[in-house]
Image (cartoon, grey):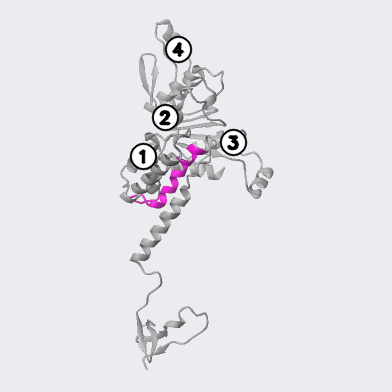
Amino acid sequence: MKARIHTLISQIVPADSYLFIRLAGHGQSLISRRVAAAFEVDAYFEYLMNRFSTPEEIFGPVSIKALKEDHYIRKTEHYLPCADFAFLDEIWKASPAILNTLLTLVNEKVFKNGEQLQQVPLSVLIGASNEIPEPNQGLDALYDRFILRLVVEPIQQAGNFHQLLQAKPGSAHLQMDEPLKITQAELAEWREQIHEIELPALVLQVIDLIRQYLQQHVDGLSVYISDRRWQRVAYLLKAAAFLNGRPQVLLEDIREMHKLIDQAILEIGLHADLQLESLIQRKDELEQQMLNAFYYTDDVYESYLIQDKEYLRAVTHLDHHYQDKVLYLLLNKMDSKQDFFAVDAS
């Protein structure tokens, strides 16, 4: 769980929509609440979707007072249109009416409330499901809007599993000191600054190679990576550089693409031979070759030939009562673990 919380907090900065894909009973609501505790949140909304969920439960009840005046307006306070951080569990079980409205809300950050367009402050939306949308349901656009999709699996390591068995139930509400929280202003400012990170030509070439490889090897399979997702791939790479204090993306940041591309294959149960790891390994090898071309692979010392032997020159700095003394050390003794003596010029 700690790994998932860490991943989410680090990725909330560049993105605003996430999707958990998991089996039941893995504490997604707990993860969402604890992630929200790291941010300044004015209004948190959480709801467990089901096929009987109504728009009133998500977007707010219709105002009876306004209805009497011939106006169809929802009372959205304390509901999703007024939330800045939201968690929707079992999201794909909701009706198409809810999900289609949700698409506009997420895409445009507006909610059509009667005759008015209500601005939505939503900065983070986390969804969770143990399934993916059924095909031909008109949900592809909303599904694609969830840029990051994290698979939550059962605990694998025995030690961690034993800790779970012995631990008492944890609190879903984590208290964090206000000065430590990421404010809404900081989050908005960081998201703007990420756009200023440089995407070098070498990184673009590697992305082109991966894109071409995908096009050649998944043709005919039910896998589609939209232009929006590729754009968000670039933004996520910039975010990785930004969060590490770098002005431009490095080749090592390309590993972040696994979160956005590999999952497109895994979600439909296919095992296409994408071999992204081999591409990254080739990239690492090329990097090493470039380093070897410009730098020495071994330490190089300036040596002095004395009586047909190579020595290193060292100057001892004692204190002000003594003059500095020049000593010479045998070069072939540098890696020796045995004691040896330095000699002076005489």
The type of residue carrying mark 3 is: Gly
Please tell me whether mark 4 or mark 2 is closer to you in this view: 2
Check disc 3 and report the residue beneath it. 27
Question: Does label 4 or label 2 sit earlier along the sequence?
Answer: 4
Check disc 4 and report the residue beneath it. 63
Please rate how many residues cluster around mark 3, counting C-alpha atoms within 10 Å: few if below 14, some from 14 to 19, many from 20: few
Question: Does label 3 or label 2 sit earlier along the sequence?
Answer: 3
Q: Are marks 4 and 2 in contact (CB under 8 Å)?
A: no
Q: Quadrant of the N terminus?
A: top right
Residue found at the very far bottom of the displayed protein: 346
**Which numbered marker is on residue 122?**
2
336 vs 236: above or below: below
The span from disc 4 to disc 1 (Cα, nearest Å) is: 36 Å
Per the image, is 58 magenta?
no
Question: Does label 3 or label 4 sit earlier along the sequence?
Answer: 3
- Say which quarter of the image contains residue 121: top left
Q: Which percent across, then down, holds residue 41? A: 45, 33
Magenta region = 244-265
